[in-house]
């Protein structure tokens, strides 16, 4: 392997056959393959969302009837949740960046890593094949007994989810072991980038919680095929039991969705403020605490389901207590900028946007946790807006920030920064315009999962749809200039942003197949800019790679 | 939107709706104020500390322990206040007054049926008197549904294997939207109904009008469906005696006495079956029919009289 201080020979081009990609054990190549896959899932899920919003422009039929609509929103959610959000940040950015950030050559189990990718693909295909089998509606929550009454399509979707679950479990397991066992000399836990801490905490949740959804869909499958009465009252089962099983995973799942996003935001705030992330210890440890405590609050999805009032009270209290550390994190990210040196490049714009949109998601989550308010708000558009604010305004905004941040390192190309800023603006404005009207119609009583609606809600739906067009334009613009950068982008330097984590200071751009030419010895934390002043001199790239003065 | 609605909330048309709204506004404004503070700080910092020199590395800021403690403790206090308030109101929302007037609600794909104790029933229009506590006992005939009245701020899932309930006391006359709010199939979004709040007199009138739709014999024949499991009408022996040709004859009882099978006998047999068991039969008729109304018993008696 030719060492190439300038990155001319790197992980992308050192071998070029299809086989060398499809059978790669390189975490970076696996990350790129995941990027392609989840981007396709996001594109498909996004198009379904645009279709939903077009249909909702008026109470009458516009482009599809009720049955088609009900299946469209169901598929939108299943794709976005299982094929996009849950894998995306860990499998793309976790894979690419985490081993480098801890100073390792790869993850602990590279073959398992590749297996996770193929398991994900197989699961996604199985889930999608449900479309060929028959109707699948009922939302991604598939509450019984409706879900077991609608035909065999659900068997394929649930088996697809079952299979994809294994990808999630194995990825999480891999990362947890990697962080424990493969940190370079001097890389103490306290020096880790917060992105690593967040992927670590996510891995814990993935391993603990995902088996529960596996068992749940398996039981659903068995009930439908063998007519065992577990959830269906006609067979002697209990429909609320399904909800308990389902949410016991699906609530921790939202932490799988948001913790990696928190990690990206921490890295962005640190890098683009050129100073310590405020409350580092708190942010790191509370993420791990949330991984465990988040398994205790599932019943806040079920306040009006028929579960006992006593359990509802306990779930509400725990939900609030777990919300506090998250709020403190937001305050920490804001105060990170205090007396810092803030640069508002595109990745940072997403972090700034995140603080706005995720906070709204958080406060509206508090509102939903209030028992007496949830009675009114449950199953209305208020909930739809809330979860889009945390999932899209949280995870997707952070993922876009991370994608832009690591794009030069991953591809060796710079994207067009002015277009980046324009697209970030379109995404921010479009997103808020799409979902703020949904809060208002929710408090006004507009139920969710409604194909048609009363005329008094139409103006909110119209504005929401217009917003989705602005949002869609922003997202398509991103796709355009990122793809264009691959062909026409300026060659990226060693450390585009001047950040201090190992992927920026100790690798070429793009990185070498083995990440490092020699094992890094770590003497400072990922945000200890004040200990690295010698790297910030005129004309020099902020890098410890041998030829850093040559470019 | 209505008389006392606002941009955010519909009419508050029940006694507890106003209390729910008060809590909503408290959480809304507290959140808005804190959110605004965070965003103002964010925007201020991002411009005040804008990078001017690419080589400048700031000194790390010393963490302030008291500030950190404050911003953990203060939100915790706020959250506990809001939790307690929400808990308290939740208890009220879940505790129907003991003298509530009860109505049965049955949800089924894709309509709502309301049944009143007096025998009245209605589809899609839930007539209730103003100013009286109403308790709805709900169940589903098929899949999960959910009963939601935004103007009253009440909601509960409707299950196929259990009864669940909500209660309200409507404060003003009018019609208020009922939505199904748990996805239940193709017509989920058209499974609508209305609460029709009328004066007590109008309610009594409506009830009377809707309860006498059926002549007594027809009401009785309808009700007899649940009796026919044990009692035939064609002389076939079953778990219970056949009832055709019974009325007006002398009935031998298990204890050796005999009695005329008149209206009183029939009435007592329904309300207290164990007291007069027919000879040759077991005392196993369920006591549950003691809840039948006078009108229902009249109907059954009228029907049984017609059986020859």
Image: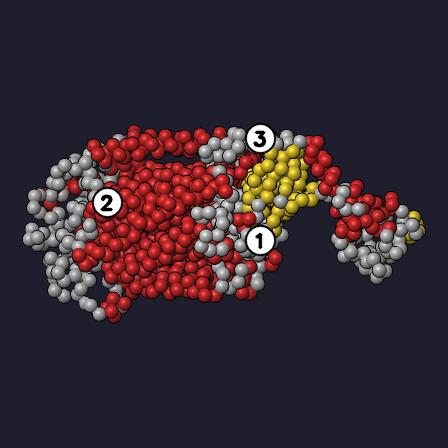
Do discs 3 and 2 belong to a common subunit? no
Please indicate, yes or no, whether residue B58 appears anywhere in the rendered image: yes
A115 or B97: which is nearer to us? B97
What is the CA distance from the residue labelled 2 to the residue labelled 1? 49 Å
| Subunit of label 1 | B
Q: In this view, does A514 lie above or below A404?
A: below
Residue at image location 87% in from the left, 45% down from the top: B263
List x then y, in percent, for residue A229: 58, 59
Do discs 1 and 3 belong to a common subunit? yes
Left or right of residue B294, residue B86 in this image: left
Q: Which mark is residue A421?
A: 2
Place residue B45 in its image quadrant.
top left
Q: Which mark is residue A515?
A: none
Contact, mark 2 vs mark 1 (Cβ under 8 Å): no
Q: Is mark 3 on a helix, strand or loop?
A: loop
Of marks 3 and 2, the one in the foreground? 2
According to the picture, the residue beneath numbered tag 3 turns out to be: B15
Label 2 environment density (alpha carbons within 10 Å; few <14, some 14–19, many ≥20): some
List x then y, in percent, for residue A524: 17, 45
| Subunit of label 3 | B
B91 or A492: which is nearer to us? A492
What is the CA distance from the residue labelled 3 to the residue labelled 2? 51 Å
Residue at image location 81% in from the left, 52% down from the top: B283
What is the CA distance from the residue labelled 1 to the residue labelled 3? 31 Å
According to the picture, the residue beneath numbered tag 1 turns out to be: B143
Q: What element carries label 2?
A: helix
Left or right of residue B252, residue A444 in this image: left
């Amino acid at each position: 392997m030719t060492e190439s201080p300038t990155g001319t020979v790197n992980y992308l081009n050192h071998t070029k056959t299809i086989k060398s990609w499809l059978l790669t054990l390189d975490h970076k190549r696996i990350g790129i393959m995941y990027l392609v896959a989840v981007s396709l899932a996001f594109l498909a899920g996004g198009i379904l969302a645009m279709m939903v919003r077009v249909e909702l422009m008026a109470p009458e039929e516009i482009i599809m009837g009720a049955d088609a609509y009900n299946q469209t929103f169901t598929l939108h959610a299943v794709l976005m949740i299982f094929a996009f959000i849950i894998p995306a940040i860990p499998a793309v950015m976790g894979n690419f960046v985490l081993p480098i950030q801890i100073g390792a050559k790869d993850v602990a189990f590279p073959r398992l890593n590749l297996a996770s990718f193929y398991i994900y693909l197989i699961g996604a295909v199985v889930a999608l094949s449900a479309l060929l089998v028959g109707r699948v509606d009922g939302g991604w929550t598939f509450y019984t007994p409706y879900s077991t009454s609608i035909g065999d399509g659900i068997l394929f979707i649930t088996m697809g989810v079952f299979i994809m679950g294994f990808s999630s479990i194995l990825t999480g397991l891999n990362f947890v072991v990697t962080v424990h066992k493969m940190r370079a000399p001097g890389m103490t836990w306290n020096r880790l980038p917060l992105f690593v801490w967040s992927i670590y905490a996510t891995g814990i949740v993935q391993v603990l919680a995902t088996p529960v959804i596996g068992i749940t869909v398996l039981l659903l499958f068995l009930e439908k095929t063998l007519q065992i009465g577990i959830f269906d009252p006609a067979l002697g089962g209990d429909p609320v039991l399904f909800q308990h099983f389902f949410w016991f995973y699906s609530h921790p799942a939202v932490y799988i969705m948001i913790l990696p996003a928190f990690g990206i935001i921490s890295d962005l705030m640190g890098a683009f403020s050129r100073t310590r992330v405020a409350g580092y210890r708190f942010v790191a440890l509370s993420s791990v605490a949330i991984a465990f405590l988040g398994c205790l609050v599932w019943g806040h999805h079920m306040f009006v389901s028929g579960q006992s009032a006593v359990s509802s009270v306990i779930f509400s209290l725990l939900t609030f207590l777990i919300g506090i550390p998250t709020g403190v994190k937001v305050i920490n990210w804001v105060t990170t900028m205090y007396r810092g040196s803030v640069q508002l490049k595109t990745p940072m714009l997403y972090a700034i946007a995140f603080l706005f949109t995720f906070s709204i998601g958080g406060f509206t989550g508090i509102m939903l946790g209030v028992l007496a308010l949830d009675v009114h708000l449950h199953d209305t558009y208020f909930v739809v807006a809330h979860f889009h604010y945390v999932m899209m305004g949280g995870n997707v905004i952070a993922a876009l920030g991370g994608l832009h941040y690591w794009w030069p390192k991953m591809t060796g190309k710079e994207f067009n920064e002015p277009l980046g800023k324009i697209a970030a603006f379109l995404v921010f404005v479009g997103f808020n315009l799409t979902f703020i009207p949904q809060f208002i119609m929710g408090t006004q009583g507009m139920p969710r999962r409604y194909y048609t609606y009363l005329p008094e809600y139409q103006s909110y739906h119209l504005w929401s749809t217009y917003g989705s067009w602005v949002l869609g334009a922003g997202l398509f613009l991103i796709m355009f200039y990122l793809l264009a950068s691959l062909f026409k982008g300026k060659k990226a330097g060693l450390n585009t942003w001047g950040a201090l984590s190992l992927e920026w200071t100790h690798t070429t751009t793009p990185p070498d197949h083995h990440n490092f030419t020699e094992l890094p010895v770590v003497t400072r934390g990922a945000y200890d800019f004040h200990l690295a002043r010698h790297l910030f001199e005129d004309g020099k790239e902020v890098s410890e790679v041998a030829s850093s003065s040559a470019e | 939107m209505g008389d006392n609605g606002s941009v955010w909330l519909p009419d508050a048309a029940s006694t507890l709706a106003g209390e729910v709204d008060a809590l909503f506004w408290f959480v809304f404004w507290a959140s808005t104020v804190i959110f605004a503070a965070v965003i103002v700080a964010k925007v201020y910092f991002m411009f005040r500390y804008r990078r001017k020199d690419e080589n400048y590395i700031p000194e790390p800021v010393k963490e302030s322990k008291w500030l950190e403690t404050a911003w953990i403790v203060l939100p915790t206090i706020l959250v506990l206040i809001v939790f307690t308030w929400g808990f308290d109101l939740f208890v009220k929302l879940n505790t129907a007054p003991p003298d509530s007037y009860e109505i049965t609600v049955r949800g089924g794909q894709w309509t709502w049926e309301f049944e009143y104790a007096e025998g009245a029933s209605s589809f899609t229009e839930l007539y209730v008197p103003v100013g009286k506590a109403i308790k709805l006992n709900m169940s589903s005939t098929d899949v999960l549904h959910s009963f939601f009245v935004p103007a009253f701020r009440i909601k509960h899932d409707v299950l196929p294997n259990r009864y669940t309930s909500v209660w309200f006391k409507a404060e003003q006359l009018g019609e208020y939207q009922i939505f199904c709010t748990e996805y239940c199939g193709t017509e989920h979004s058209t499974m609508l109904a209305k609460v029709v709040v009328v004066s007590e007199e109008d309610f009594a009138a409506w009830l009377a009008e809707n309860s006498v739709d059926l002549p007594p014999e027809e009401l009785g024949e309808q009700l007899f469906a649940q009796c026919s499991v044990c009692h035939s009408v064609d002389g076939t022996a079953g778990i219970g005696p056949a009832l055709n040709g019974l009325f007006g004859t002398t009935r031998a009882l298990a204890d050796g006495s005999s009695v005329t099978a008149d209206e009183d006998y029939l009435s007592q047999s329904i309300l207290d079956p164990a007291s007069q068991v027919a000879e040759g039969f077991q005392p196993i008729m369920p006591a549950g029919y003691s809840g039948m109304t006078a009108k229902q018993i009249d109907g059954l008696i009228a029907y049984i009289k017609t059986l020859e």
